[in-house]
Image (tube, helix red, strand yellow):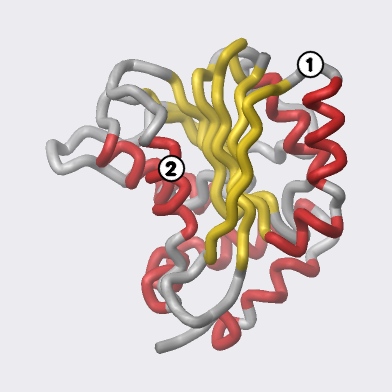
Amino acid sequence: MKTPDDFSVDNVYAYGSSEDLKKYYNDWAHQYDEYTEQVQYVLAQYVAMCAAKHIPDTDVQVLDIGCGTGIVGENLAARRPGALIDGVDISKKMINLAKLKSNPDGSLCYRNFYCQDLTKQSTVIKEQYDFLVSAGTFTLGHLGVNDLIYIIKYLKSGGKAFVSVKGDHFESDNFSEEIDKAIKEGLIKSLFIHETNAYNSNFNALNKIITFTKI
């Protein structure tokens, strides 16, 4: 079985600019789903499963942060076909593949998309979403703790977030400290953090799964 090392995936963690990151994912888009299967990368499926335990099968609105090719949305839609899922990603080519993800009845998994860099000005509507989900986007060279605090504004009051953060990134970017600060400032509550491996294999890539509610 291949591992992420066979694909030199660590290269993506070293990018210093959004433009470099966009090019990387545009170039990788058509091989990405095959890659996740070959290395048994299951973080997206796991986040979707965790979120589905709390999301009702009604027309609630869900925003998938860093939706990529749509693996989170596909797995969430399979469990909660009534949810209205929007995706945002920096890569247009990744989004083009996410647009093709569909349910067994032929309906599309996603409703709308935003092709945007969330570290810059965004047109995502504030206080629109009942739930936020994100898998694999809060990691080295991608989104950081300030971006986690920033996206809270997309949630309605009482909305819930389910976000994965790569373990070493969680420590190096002081996520714990900033999350505690957000709680003290009355931005979020009901924090729960647990850990999982991103791969269904012996390859070790621990991620923190952060769940919280917007006040």
Name which residue type carries label 1. Answer: Gly
In the image: residue 140, left or right of residue 16:
left
Name which residue type carries label 2. Answer: Cys
Residue 102, position as x, y percentages in the image: 25, 42
* In-front residue for pair 162/111: 162
Contact? badges 1 and 2 (CB < 8 Å): no
Residue 93, position as x, y percentages in the image: 51, 52
Q: Is residue 65 above or below residue 125?
A: below
Residue 1, position as x, y percentages in the image: 40, 88
Element class at badge 2: helix
Q: Residue at x 85, y 37 (%)?
A: 178
Cα distance in 3D space between marks 1 and 2: 24 Å
Q: Quadrant of residue 79?
A: top left
Q: Point out which mark residue 50 bears.
A: 2
Q: Point out which mark residue 186 bears.
A: 1
Quadrant where the C terminus is found in the figure: top right
Q: Residue at x 77, y 31 (%)?
A: 149
In the image: residue 93, left or right of residue 142:
left
